[in-house]
Image (cartoon, grey):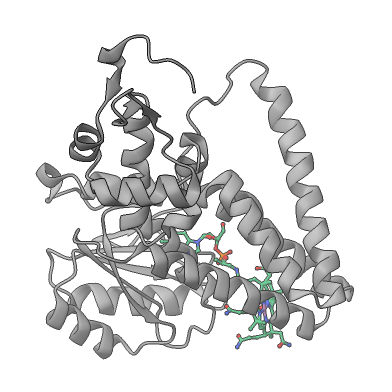
Amino acid sequence: MKSINKLQDYLSIGELSEMTGIGVHTLRVWEKRYGAPHSQRLPSGHRRYPKEEVPRLKAIASALESGYRASKVATATMEELQSLMGLAPFNKPQSGAELRKQDTLASDKTVVEGWIQLIHAGKDDELLNGFYEQFGRQGAINFICDFAVPLLERIGNGWETGELSVTHEHFASECLVSFLSEKWRQMNVRKSGPLALITTLPGESYSLGILMCAVITSLTNSKIMYLGVDNPIEEIVDASEKYNPELIVISISHKFDIVTSEKLTRQLRKKIDKDTSIVTGGKGSPCNIEGISYIASFQKYYNFLNEINQPHKSNHSIESVS
Ligand code: B12
């Protein structure tokens, strides 16, 4: 055991519990079970914890609130916790950024090609493990933008050239659907922020866009109400009247021609309370409908959510964010 030199740099178990919101009993159990947070003992036998444990334990407390298990997070580093919660890692190095960007792009491509091989081989367990690994390493936004979307594009190209069959496409989509569903549901528990109703227009069969929106939404304080695909306009209006969401989020795939998607979104805007924002995205989305925010990327969608989640910005402007 290291000796405790400066007692003022250490906290008692009661002080640590008060500062992090994690109970005294829980801290003791974790130490016994997982070896963390590790305490040092005074000659009297009382535990003392370094003050640096406070931010890490606070991050653990919010990961637990988001539905993660103690067994998964109790020993995690600060960086791992941030990445788990979909935030950028703390100590992102700045120098040589361009060089690294190129390296990263090349290695992202290698990861996606590895997944394509797993799809060929029908190995769903390994494919899902790959998703978990990259999600954990990169965080939610990077996972979606740099891995999930490129994977779908690569599958689309493979299908076009005849390399991949419809079976491959279905197999891979189903793996991604269950992975993304698990992620957003896990992070949606005990949320009390503004309600975001997530759905698609009638006639839409593509669900991956709204699942990605749900994962990004679950990184914020917003509570998600997920209605899935292919909802009649009247049903979306009913749900909106009943649950009074702050925001309706709609993903519109390439399947929609612009005339149809414009017609439907205008109809929806007309029937929804003007205090409820409507956000759309996706290849088939119109970008010039009055009163509807078209958002071109998931990063911008995330920024938009954070803005509307600030209490003083309840009456935010509705405009295209491209
Ligand atoms: C996955 C997939 C499927 C899955 C769908 C599963 C599911 N649960 O959704 C399945 C296997 C069911 C399927 C079936 C078919 N598919 Co398909 N499919 C795809 C694939 C690989 C990905 C589509 C997708 O989900 N993209 C994800 C969304 C999110 O992408 P996006 O609209 O481009 O949006 C982007 C952004 O705008 C943003 N975004 C999206 N929404 C939102 C919302 C907000 C708020 C924000 C901020 C951002 C945002 O995210 C995306 C990333 O940048 C594409 C290939 C491709 N390149 O797209 C083919 C593709 C779309 N499919 C195609 C075809 C032909 C079919 C089938 C007809 C094949 C068949 N013979 O069965 C059927 C038809 C199904 C149907 N009923 O319509 C063709 C369509 C060709 C065309 N132009 O018409 C494509 C392009 C493949 C190809 N290269 O030919 N497919």
Q: Indicate the quadrant of ligand 1 in the picture.
A: bottom right
Residue 6 falls left or right of residue 2: left
State the residue at coordinates (21%, 35%): 19
Which is more toward the observer, 260 or 108? 108
Q: Can residue 149 be seen in this view?
A: no
State the residue at coordinates (26%, 89%): 235
Horizontal and vertical percent position of residue 116 = 81, 65
Note whether 17 is above or below 301 in the view shown: above
Residue 224 falls left or right of residue 208: left
Horizontal and vertical percent position of residue 306 = 29, 46
Horizontal and vertical percent position of residue 275 = 12, 63
Horizontal and vertical percent position of residue 93 = 58, 21
Q: Can residue 104 be seen in this view?
A: yes
Q: Furthest residue to the front?
A: 44
State the residue at coordinates (27%, 83%): 236
Which is more toward the observer, 31 or 71? 31
Note whether 287 is above or below 18 in the view shown: below
Which is more toward the observer, 221 or 227? 221
Indicate the quadrant where residue 262 lies.
Answer: bottom left
Residue 99 falls left or right of residue 197: right
Marks counted in the figure total: 0
State the residue at coordinates (30%, 57%): 65
